[in-house]
Image (spheres, grey):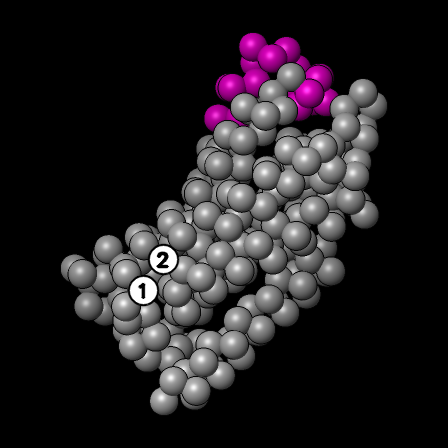
Amino acid sequence: MNKTRNTKTLTLLGVLIAIQVVLTMANIGLIPLPFIKATILHIPVIIGAVLLGPTEGMILGLSFGIMSIVMNTVQPGVTSFVFSPFITVGDNSGNLTSLFVAIVPRILIGVTAYYSYKLVCKFDKTKVIAYSVAGLVGALTNTILVMGSIYVLFGNQYAAAKEIPFSALFGAIMAIVGTNGVPEAIGAAIIVPALCKPLNMIFRLNTARVNKGRA
């Protein structure tokens, strides 16, 4: 039973990473917007976390972060230096701190999505609401931690790149959270339950059994 379960886990994990790669290569995983690149790459991370567990969610989050570094390196924008240590835009250069911004918040998506899902599952036996809450929490984790990290670690450089005073940066970041982060979270709350149930059936996962002992 454990061997079969592990095979199914690795198979679904591989499928979700492949989806991330396809979305990235097709330029629909990271969508350039005036202040930041909107994303749907958090969706596979959240799905992996709730169906497979926090470790797999963190692996998918790491994959998301690596994709972000790659795309901001090969297709740089004016603020790509905050995500890639290999990019210089004007007087602003990426550094090792860029790796933190690109990777750590994305890894934490898998953690917050999984534990919010497990918490709500105690009250929601259908798991539909639990899937939605995981989508909402996971997406907001990405937006809030990424933008918060940019503000703390690259505030002055980011403001300069966007040609706004630093005093206006907090308001600009809150606007991004509202205009990008909230719609992304609502979308995740709808998409995650819509995909988790059929994926669970296709791979014949017993989510409760897979996640047993991981709480």
In this view, the mark in front (1 or 2): 1
Residue type, mark 2 in image: Tyr
User: Can you say whether 183 is above or below 118 in the image?
Assistant: above
Q: Quadrant of residue 129?
A: bottom left
User: Which disc, if any, is residue 114?
Assistant: 2
Of the 4 image quadrants, the one containing the N terminus is: bottom left
Could you tell me which residue is drawn at 58 percent across and 29 percent down? 150
- Range of residues picked out in magenta: 157-175
The answer to whether residue 10 shows anywhere in this view is yes
- In the visual, does 141 lie left or right of 147? left
Could you tell me which residue is drawn at 66 percent across and 52 percent down? 66
Query: Would residue 140 be counted in the magenta stretch?
Result: no
Could you tell me which residue is drawn at 54 percent across and 23 percent down? 152
**Please, what secondary structure does the residue beneath circle 1 have?**
loop
Looking at this view, is 213 or 87 the one in front? 213
User: Can you say whether 66 is above or below 93 in the image?
Assistant: below
Which of disc 2 and disc 1 is earlier in sequence?
2
Of the 4 image quadrants, the one containing the C terminus is: bottom left
Residue type, mark 1 in image: Arg
Q: Give residue 65's position: percent from left, percent from top.
A: 61, 50
User: Which disc, if any, is residue 214?
Assistant: 1
The answer to whether residue 183 shows anywhere in this view is no
Could you tell me which residue is drawn at 76 percent across and 24 percent down? 92
**Please, what secondary structure does the residue beneath circle 2 have?**
helix
Q: Give residue 46's position: percent from left, percent from top.
A: 45, 58
Overall secondary structure of the magenta stretch? Answer: helix
Marks 1 and 2 close (CB-CB < 8 Å): yes
